[in-house]
Amino acid sequence: MESEPFIPVGVEELEQLAMKLKEDLPLSSYVYNMMLHHARKYADKVDFFILKNSPDSHIVLWKNKDNQMALGIHCLEKEVSLLEESLKNTKEIDFKKSLCIFHAPDFFVNLLMDLGKEALGTDMTKDSSDDFIFDENQQLPPLMCPAGFAVKSLGKAGLEIMHSNWRYKVCVPLEEALQVAKNTAALGIYADANLKVEYEVNIANIPMAKDDEIPKSWICATLHGTVGMLMTDENYRGRGFAKLLSQVCAKMMHDKGYFVHTCVERDMPDVKRLYENLPGWSINRQVTWIWQGCDDNAKKE
């Protein structure tokens, strides 16, 4: 085996690297947003790596600090041969051990599957999701909150409820998830009898909920850079809360320099229909998740 091809990127270098990968958007959306989280010290969950001997390459590897149960790769299509050579010589990924690879684009899925099969003697599992992106330049209707309710930043109770109802809470501990959410966007819709008429939400002036207030619907920016954790109390569905929160969250993330997108899994047809019909949103591409040695509840976001 040749010398290790990947070298770590220091925290102080992440924002500059993110700006380099900005020209690859929307392909680089996941790693771009995650780099911003870590550069701004909203997160400290993963390490980032670049190729030691190819400084002009756009290949970036990221993975959990303590394991490889969450890892991802950004690579341009023209760089797949270089990626293959690097993956065959790295010790940063061990295909013989449990792992979960996030958000792989179509053009190197087969490479990853082949490397896994070569190491394991059997196929790894894969599944795909739809990646929706938000066009901030599209003219959108006013963001109107219905009478009797208010859009607020989540307080302590709201943050805890959001995380406890998240299907992948085992992947990201409460404090790590909330550190990102609180610094980017963590929103809920709360009952407020004092609001007798609908009102237009002012993105620049969203009030903070009290710590003991319970939201009826919620959403946030996730550790892995998406608009996510969207959910509405079953007693309050059908009122347009998910639509409103998705748009408010998107605008807040855009205003903070993030590339706004969300990942919708195949077993969530209602959410897919929501984003298919939501102004400003469109399907960009499919991304593939590849894993082995972990159950379905320990993958994806």
Image (spheres, helix red, strand yellow):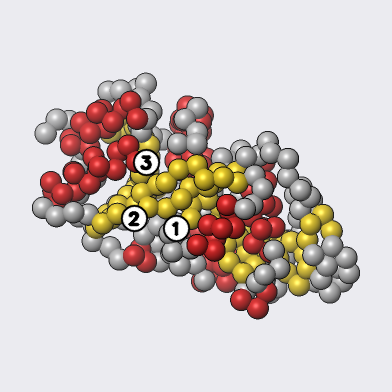
Residue at image point 14% right, 55% down? 122
Give the residue drawn at x 42%, y 46%.
Answer: 286
Amino acid at circle 3: Pro
Which amino acid type is shown beneath numbered disc 1? Answer: Glu
Check if mark 3's residue and mark 1's residue have beta carbons within 8 Å.
no
Residue 138's image quarter?
top right
Q: Give the amino acid at mark 2.
A: Asp
Q: Residue at x 43, y 59 (%)?
A: 266
Distance from disc 3 to disc 1, alpha carbons, whole Å, reads 15 Å
Question: Is residue 280 or residue 7 the one in the foreground?
Answer: 280
Label 2 with label 1: CB-CB less than 8 Å: yes
For disc 3, the marked residue is 105
Farthest residue in the bottom direction? 235
Disc 3 element: loop
Q: Residue at x 45, y 43 (%)?
A: 285
Q: Tell me the element at label 1.
A: strand
Q: Quadrant of the N terminus?
A: top left
* Element marked by disc 2: strand
- Cα separation, mark 2 vs mark 3, equals 12 Å
Above or below, 217 relative to 139: below
> Could you tell me residue 27's position as x and y percent?
45, 36
Q: What numbered label is drawn on residue 265?
A: 1
